[in-house]
Amino acid sequence: MKNLLAGIGLSIIAMFVLSACATSGSSDEGDSTGGDGAADKSEVTIAFQENIQTMDPHNGSAGIDNSVQYAIYESMFTPDEDGELQPLLATDYEISDDGLTYTFKLRDDVTFTDGAEFNADAVKANLDRIIDSEGSLNNYKSLRDVEKVEVADDYEVEVTLNNINSQFINKIGMLRMASPDALENDIDFGEESAGTGPFVLEKWNHGDSLVATKNEDYWEEDLPKVDKVTFKPIPEDGSRIAMLKTGEADYIFPVPVNDVESLEAEDNIEVSVVESTYVNYATINTSKEPFNKKEVRQAMNYALNQEDFVKVVKNGYGIVSDSALPATNNYYAAQEPYDYDLEKAKELLADAGYEDGFSTEIWGSDSSKDKRGMQFIQQQLGEIGIDVEIKQMERGTLSDEINKPESAEDSEVEMWYVGWSSQVGDADNATNPLFSSSSFPPNGSNTAYYDNEKADKLIEEGLHAKSEEEAAEKYAELQEILWDDAPWLFTAVDEEPTAMRKGLKGIWRSADGNFYLREVEWE
Amino acid sequence: MGRYIIKRIIGLIPLLLAVSFLIFIFIHLIPGDPARLMAGKDATNDEVEALRTYLGLDKPILEQYFIYMKELFQGDLGHSLRSNAPVTQLFGERFLPSLQLSILSIGWAMLIGILLGVISAVFRGRWPDYFGTITAISGISVPNFWLGLVMIQLFAVQFNIFPAGGIETWKGYVLPSFALGAGIMAMITRFTRSSLVQTLQEDFIRTARSRGLGERAIIFGHALKKSMITVLTIAGLQFGFLLGGSIVVETVFSFPGMGRLLIDSIQFRDYPVVQSLLLIFSLEFILVNLIVDILYGFFNPKIRYN
């Protein structure tokens, strides 16, 4: 029996020794596990949370889809780090005096990676595909107002709108262009790519990684500066951080705010924080008692300590809201804050006839993050006698519950804890689906059932303004009304930490959550 | 035996038909509208409707089922609503990694589990038994996501022996298979031990001893063979579960397996992917059970199938 035991013991020891030899032997080769920071300077690996859903350049919905696609497919314009649009595939554009016709002048030195030429016909083919989809392609929303697209010249396209749209350039300018041949042949965009971008799709292993390699014939000389970019969805926060530490990933986000400090302590890691366009809030159903009284909604806002919200719920990574638009939006106008004031809140409640408070319900997703936010609101509103019950739902169920009622009368939601992210240049998307009376579910996300004629008119006027100044004026007035009417419980705008290996340059995240890597390189 | 297997396989067809119908109905009954989830919160109702029509979700549910079945019989599992990739392709990319991971996990779990179980049974009530018991209890009690994160911290971040995630090389399989197999190893240890302890008290063992057989021959030649029936049942069931993928371990190790595919697809109500995966899981489970049944006969020739 002792022999048996000794035998087993020996074999286990032998196994360990063998496996140790095997692993130390191969890690000397410095393959993918080499985490000494001596990363391969010709490659970049980017890790993020969400899965890549589609590589169809006209159907990206999530921020990740868009960002990955921008490495391969380019748009006529692209934002710089300040959120200003800069020419990319277009060189310039003009708007007709009536504000309805946009003329785009295109670069004449660009070809798609399948050999097709980039010109006015190519742009028309792309826009037509999106318009003809009538909604089955996600980018359709950007072209809702387009009446027709015409080729004016080899490198000139004219787009005519039904209505003036002050936000239009931000929408059409960001649409990705694919080779007209590829569109005609209906290629599988998950298998091959045909863009003009700095990289070419090499291989997409769904759910594991997407590898893009250098476009050798890229139209801008000296770019790209790396040979290969790998995109990896890594759902678990701890794993993503471990991969950055070991060098398996070079650039990661989101970084959980609790881990920022420990990452900053690492020698070869850099953390940066981006002020985002993501607004956190809870909608208050203005069509229901007691929320139909403005005093009640204002009281709720006075009762919520926004600074504490940032500290407790966002671990300090947030900026107190002082408008319905985030400060990162081009049309943002700051308002007089609802300073935390319980006395005033109670007074307002009493004025409205609810000095004893009332009971209500708040809905939200089933994430632990959202739970924390709702618990904070529950605790704060409890201070003025509003008894809040938290109801968390899985996202599909929640979406059904929100969108089932066809009118304000049938609506069941009282408060909804949620958030909204929009493009920096797009004030329409940051107001219309949220505050317009035409956006009651299921037609949009106005779950406050906010119905204000003046606001509706300003949303229209802002969208159809003929000049930037006029639009800015309308949106400023709109923000003032929204702030005073308080259809939301205002909380904070997210600040988003991103972490990368030191020495990586030319990759950056925009406020609206995209990342851009045209000029990515190692120092 | 051959006839038995053929009979079992023919019996699968009505079973799978019933399963496919149930899966289809259940998936369409859970709340959540794929068209709305895909279109986004800023979509108008008309845009959602257009997308629904485009995806074929506006047809009556039974009609959708018949279309699905018709395609299924032609070997077409449909396309993902979300990425438009064929389900067969999505499945193909995940199946092999999941299968390899399952085999590795069950392999080492059985190897170590049976060894520890035998040692515990033979040295019942002495320190090797306590050692085995403690290992087994730890294996069952430690949640595998925690074990996974600790292993990443230790073997990837500190010692840099294995990658923290992904499966570019064979090393990517090591940590996940350990995290996944730990609980099963513990279970097999316990079952081997209790079954062997019982067997060792039976008459035929006493007979074997009285014939002067060596202890090693008795344990490995006679007793363990009988105990294997229990172990095999457990291992077979666990293997069936493993093939379906482990959402938690796959998430921790960013492992491109079936579990993550399933959970991602459920989140977006990607009907074609979810229903095909569930159907395949059912088939796998039935097949594993069939194999276990056949193996019974190998360990105990008295078990006969007619």
Image (tube, rainbow, N blue to C red):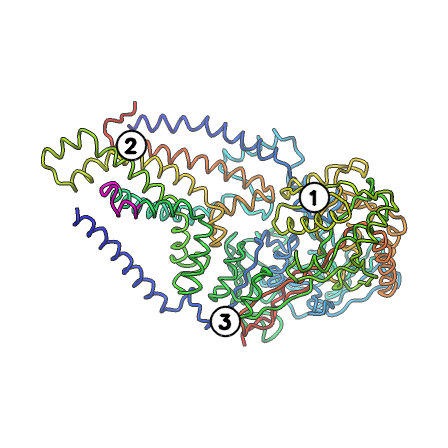
The amino acid sitting under disc 3 is Ser
Give how far apart the Cα atoms at labels 3 and 2 are. Answer: 55 Å
Q: What chain letter is assigned to the residue under label 2?
A: B
Q: Which residue is mark 1?
A: A363
Q: Amino acid at mark 1?
A: Trp
> What chain does badge 3 belong to?
A
Distance between mark 3 and mark 1 Cα atoms: 47 Å
Tell me, yes or no, whether the two marked residues, 2 and 1, touch with CB atoms within 8 Å.
no
Q: Residue furthest left?
A: B212
Residue located at (53% from left, 35% from top)? B71
Within-10-Å neighbours for mark 1: few <14, some 14–19, many 20+ = many
Residue drawn at (48%, 53%) of the image: B252
Query: Which quadrant of the view contains residue A504?
Result: bottom right
Going 62% across and 68% down the picture, which residue do you hit? A272
Magenta stretch: give its range. B121-132
Q: Secondary structure at mark 1?
A: strand
Observer-nearest of B247 and B219 = B219
Q: Nearer the viewer, residue B250 or A85?
A: B250
Q: Is residue A385 left or right of residue B229?
A: right
What's under tag 2, amino acid-wise?
Tyr
Q: Is residue B129 above or below residue A467?
A: above
Q: Which mark is residue A263?
A: none
Residue at image mark 2: B296
Q: Mark 2 against mark 1, which lies toward the viewer?
A: 1
Report the front residue among A430 and A116: A430
Name the magenta segment's main secondary structure: helix
Label 1 chain ID: A
Mark 3 secondary-structure assignment? loop
Q: Secondary structure at mark 2?
A: helix
> For the C terminus of chain A, which image quadrant?
bottom right
Residue B132: percent from left, percent from top: 30, 46
